[in-house]
Image (tube, coloured by chain):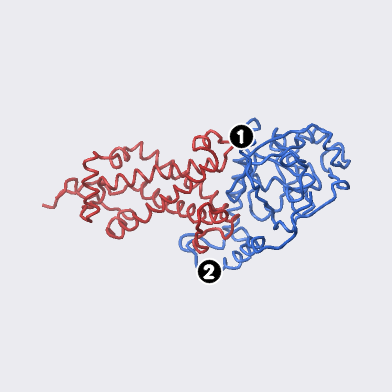
Amino acid sequence: MSPKPPIVRHDDLKPEFGRLRRRGLLRGGFSLGALTLLTGCDLSTHSGVDAALEAMLRFDDRIQEALFDKSRLAETYPASAITHPFRFNAYYPEWQVRIIDPATWRLGVSGLVRETRAWSVADLRALPQQRQITRHICIEGWSQIGQWSGVPLHVFLKRIGADLRAKYVSFTCFDGYSTSIDMPSALQSQTIMALDFESRPLTPEWGAPLRLRIPTKLGYKSAKNLQSIAVTNKYPGGYWENQGYDWFAGV
Amino acid sequence: MRPLRSARPAHPVPIRIMHWIGVYAIGCMMFSGWEIYDASPSLPFLFPQWAGLGGWLGGALAWHLSAMWLLFADGLAYLAYGIATGHFRRDLAPLHPREVGRDLGAALRFALPHRIGHYNAVQRLLYAGIIIVITFAVATGLAIWKPIQFGWLTGLFGGYPIARGIHLAMMGLIAAFVVIHVTLVAFYPRTLVSMIANTSADPETTP
């Protein structure tokens, strides 16, 4: 159950180097985009074009909300379709995975709910569980099929007396990550708070002790290493959403 | 007496407007698409950094998911126009295979006459082909944007990973078309003028 030895490989850092290089080269460099379009519009500045792009992303979010239908289920697969080896993904490399003692960990609950008491792993295991084999689709384009099981989020939200008319459910993680989803997607039957990955309790790299698994959204919504949940009407944003990934991220 | 010239313009104004909006939209889609591809390349090559649009994955996606509406609207307007005015039937409908063979042979020998406002068999093949290819690019794009909400469409293309592969292949075909198209325009610069300014079509009959 212990994570892989924390050895820094060049491959682990490559994505970070890539990001740094991208940011650095962007300004003033020649680009095909500069010929016909406007370059430097990457949602990091506050130029008019960035504002237009952000407005378009909000427009896309509204379209995505309208397209979303709770009764449309993500395809499920046989165990033979599960991807091996399963690809690690986070905003940091694998050697930086945070480890927490599941025995002392508690899930915090706040916002528009009736009961705000914290939940232990044992409390969560006592609730109804659901198992699924579904496709995880990353915003980068790659995808993989995995098996998770845990508490359906709609069961949990009803158990804590959440206001189901609220707009957002937001997730804060102890690895510094955060994200948020719309209430209809939170109540979709395949949205679960996963405790197990491939029939074994989650290990730290897969989000121990508790992660969100939401197959109707892109991978960055399936937050790992959950610390707390909040139900709110105030737009909560998220780690990637605040940098320019679209908020709804439905698939 | 001057030879009788057709009063018909080589390209009606709506075609010219939709053409150039389409160029911009396809440009945005292609350059931002390359940046998105680079985030997780499915083939053993990367597009150079300078060819991308958006600066990073989030920026590229914002461009891609914005310009797609422009392409969608422009494409729909063009399809409606092409059907309603008979443009497709008159100008783009494929000719008899014999004429295709003849014109293709002539084109490969660089001996195919090019008349403004009239499409030979090779042009008809290329222009009808690119319309179909762009339609597939849009359809596979929708399939990988919403593989659950448009699950029927994604299923039609064989599931998410295959639809994504077809989407990339359509980009390749569009890029190939652009290379051929722009090269031919460079050979016949009059065609570029006719897509911008009012230009009469050449006479109906070959001299």
- The residues bearing labels 1 and 2 have C-alpha atoms spaced at a distance of 44 Å
Left or right: where A221 falls relative to B195: right
Query: In the rendering, what colour is chain B?
Result: red
> Which residue is at the front of the view, B50 or A80?
A80
Q: Secondary structure at mark 1?
A: loop
Chain of the residue on which disc 1 is drawn: A
Query: From what the image shows, is residue A177 above or below residue B50?
Result: above
Q: Is residue A100 left or right of residue A34?
A: right
Along the line of sight, the residue nearer the viewer: A31 or A91: A91
* Amino acid at dot 1: Glu
Query: Which of the numbered marks, if any, corresponds to residue B112?
Result: none
Q: Position of residue B108 (x, y in %)?
A: 25, 53
Question: Mark 1 sits on what residue?
Answer: A75
Residue depicted at 66% across the width and 46% down the height:
A219
Colour in which chain A is drawn: blue
Q: Residue at x 80, y 44 (%)?
A: A229
Labels 1 and 2: the sequence-earlier one: 2
* Image coordinates for residue A130, horizontal then vertical, percent: 74, 33
| Residue count near mark 2 (Cα–Cα under 10 Å), binned few <14, some 14–19, many ≥20 | few
| Residue B110 at x, y percent in the picture | 23, 56
Secondary structure at numbered mark 2: loop
* Subunit ID for the residue under disc 2: A
Vertical relation: B110 (above or below) A103: below
Q: Residue at x 33, y 47 (%)?
A: B126
The residue indicated by pointer 2 is A29
